[in-house]
Amino acid sequence: MAISKIFIKIKLKLAAPFSLHLKVLTPFLAFVVTGCVSVANYQANLQTWVGQSEQALVQTWGTPNLIQQLGNVRRISFLRNNGTEVFNGYWGPRMQSLYCTTIFSVENGIIIQASYEGNECVSY
């Protein structure tokens, strides 16, 4: 009987820190997974435009910020700026611009490729 009581006490002491770590890590992991899913959704939404017309794109997205002609391909860019985020860094407060540039490549009036760059390219 005495050995089983010792085993139970050791098991409880080991389980307590693990459950504490689990409580701390769960919200962090949920945030990371949500962030990844949002970016994946944005990419998936962009891919639905491949094969669609340039005219439909402009009717839906509005006036592009930039249009470039590169040979037979037009690059149509839309810029979204969501301001600035302030967060605490190692040496004090830091600022980071929040933006997303979405680029569509168009050939013969049809979208052939969609891509993005930035830190605020998310869909829900």
Image: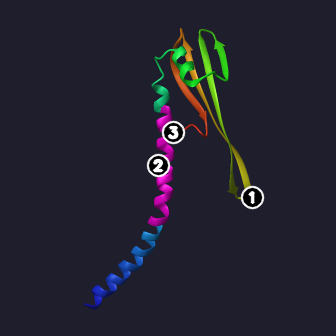
Figure quadrant of residue 92: bottom right
The CA span between labels 3 and 2 is 10 Å
- The segment highlighted magenta reads 22-43
Q: Which residue is mark 3?
A: 39
Labels 3 and 2: the sequence-earlier one:
2
Local secondary structure at mark 2:
helix
Image: 51 above or below 97: above
The CA span between labels 3 and 1 is 29 Å
* Residue furthest out toward the left: 1
> Viewer-nearest of labels 1 and 2?
2
The CA span between labels 1 and 2 is 28 Å
Q: Which residue is mark 2?
A: 33
Q: Residue at 50% across / 50% down in the picture?
A: 32
> Can residue 28 be found in the magenta stretch?
yes
Figure quadrant of residue 79: top right
Tell me the amino acid under the disc marked 3: Val
Q: Position of residue 59 (x, y in %)?
A: 55, 19
Label 3–label 2 contact, CB within 8 A: no
Q: Is residue 79 left or right of residue 54?
A: right
Quarter of the image where the N terminus is located: bottom left
> Viewer-nearest of labels 3 and 1?
3
Q: Nearer the viewer, residue 30 or 14?
A: 30
Image: 58 above or below 39: above
Q: Which residue is mark 1?
A: 91
Q: Nearer the viewer, residue 31 or 71?
A: 31
Labels 1 and 2: the sequence-earlier one:
2
